[in-house]
């Protein structure tokens, strides 16, 4: 009898334990996150992207063609001003210099002989032994030889310069950031062999629209950001603005220099960067960009919460600044200072829907 009672008690306890727990939260309304709209003025900020490049930079080339004989530097190597970067093997340069030197020597010898002959003729002319015609003929010959001597000296100097051009040296302290040929390859005269840039100063060239270029002056300050380096920014200054736009795009080039000690920063030439410009100030209701549904479409709108219910307000975006926008209600909509707008949980919201809110 006692065993039966004990088993019955265990069975009752087991059944009680198998019941589902009671859900004390009976509010099934959708939860949304909201924030207060603010009436005010918003300075519109626009970002223009480009690639960072050295302020001091040069593309180096030989003036004469030939075979690249040596290139003792590598990509990314730091070099000092005057350091040898490459040599050119042009078999014509050596013989050409020797020929120019020989021509100069021959012309010099002939000129000296003509000068001595003219001096003798001058004495003979004074004594009446030779006529004036012989004297003038030798004087003309001496003048021609003087002109030929000047030409021979210029030719030798030019040949020497071409021979010196067979050695490429660094024009300033910098870093080699591009190389276009390897030893043994033929390079044409004027063909860019390598590029060098000074690492201490960086800049970026951006293309500005006509609506903004009139507001941007040389000396204006900007903010420079690198998307890969989130949370970091550097001051910038406009150093050049073109008054003539690109005929293909209608945009105007502007150069912004980074005003920072680049050597002590993570900035590097070649990084994609953004220059931020202020562009006007507009009045409106300011809300986070996350509050806008379809911000780049034809029907931007916000969900306004009033008395726990959703009300759709169609808006016109009049200004944007990074994560905030200034809007104006349209089509008879209402949106004023202090209204609660949904920033998270937009999915499947409809007019009149009851929701729970969280800031």
Image: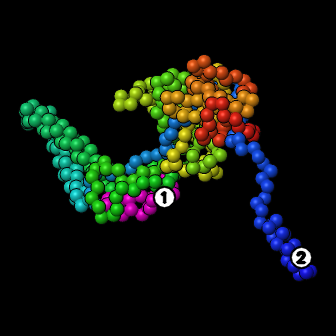
Q: Tell me: 247 left or right of 284.
A: left
Read off the residue under disc 2. 5
Q: Mark yes or no: residue 263 visible.
A: no
Q: Residues within 10 Å of mark 2 (few under 14, many from 20)?
A: few
Q: How is the image coloured?
A: rainbow
- Sequence-first disc among 1 and 2: 2
Counting labels gives 2
The residue sitting at 50% across, 32% down in the picture is 297
Q: Which residues are magenta?
A: 68-89
Q: Residues within 10 Å of mark 1 (few under 14, many from 20)?
A: few
The residue sitting at 49% across, 59% down in the picture is 77
- Per the model, the C-alpha gap separating discs 1 and 2 is 89 Å
Q: Is residue 118 magenta?
A: no
Q: Which mark is residue 288?
A: none
Residue 164: give x, y in percent of width and height.
34, 54
The residue sitting at 46% across, 46% down in the picture is 57
Taking depth in this image into account, of 306 and 57 the one nearest to the observer is 306
Read off the residue under disc 1. 76
* Above or below, comparing residue 188 to residue 204 in the picture: below
Residue sitting at the far right: 2
Q: Nearer the viewer, mark 1 or mark 2?
A: 2
């Amino acid at each position: 009898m006692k065993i039966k009672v004990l088993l019955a008690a265990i069975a009752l306890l087991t059944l009680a334990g198998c019941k589902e727990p009671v859900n004390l939260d009976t509010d099934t309304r959708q939860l949304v996150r909201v924030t207060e709209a603010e009436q005010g003025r918003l300075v519109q900020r626009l970002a223009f992207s480009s690639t960072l490049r050295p302020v001091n930079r040069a593309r180096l080339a030989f003036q004469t063609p030939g075979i690249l004989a040596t290139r003792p530097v590598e990509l990314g190597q730091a070099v000092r001003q005057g350091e040898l970067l490459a040599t050119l093997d042009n078999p014509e340069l050596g013989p050409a210099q020797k020929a120019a030197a020989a021509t100069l020597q021959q012309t010099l010898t002939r000129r000296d002989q003509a000068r001595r002959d003219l001096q003798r003729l001058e004495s003979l002319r004074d004594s009446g032994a030779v006529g004036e015609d012989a004297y003038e003929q030798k004087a003309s010959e001496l003048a021609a030889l003087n002109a030929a001597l000047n030409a021979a000296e210029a030719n030798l100097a030019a040949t020497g310069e071409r021979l010196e051009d067979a050695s490429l040296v660094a024009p300033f302290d910098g870093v080699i950031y591009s190389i276009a040929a390897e030893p043994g390859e033929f390079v044409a005269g004027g063909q860019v062999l390598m590029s060098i840039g000074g690492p201490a100063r960086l800049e970026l060239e951006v293309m500005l629209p006509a609506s903004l270029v009139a507001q941007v002056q040389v000396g204006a300050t900007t903010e420079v950001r690198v998307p890969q380096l989130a949370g970091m920014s550097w001051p910038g200054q406009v150093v050049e603005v073109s008054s003539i736009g690109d005929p293909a795009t209608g945009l105007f080039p502007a150069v912004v220099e980074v005003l920072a000690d680049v050597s002590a920063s993570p900035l590097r030439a070649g990084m994609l960067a953004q220059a931020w410009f202020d562009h006007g100030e507009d009045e409106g209701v300011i809300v986070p960009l996350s509050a806008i549904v379809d911000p780049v479409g034809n029907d931007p709108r916000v969900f306004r919460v009033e008395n726990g219910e959703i009300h759709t307000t169609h808006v016109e975006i009049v200004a944007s600044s990074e994560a905030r926008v200034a809007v104006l209600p349209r089509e008879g909509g209402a949106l004023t200072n202090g209204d609660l707008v949904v920033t998270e949980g937009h999915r499947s919201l409809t007019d009149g829907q009851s929701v729970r809110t969280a800031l």
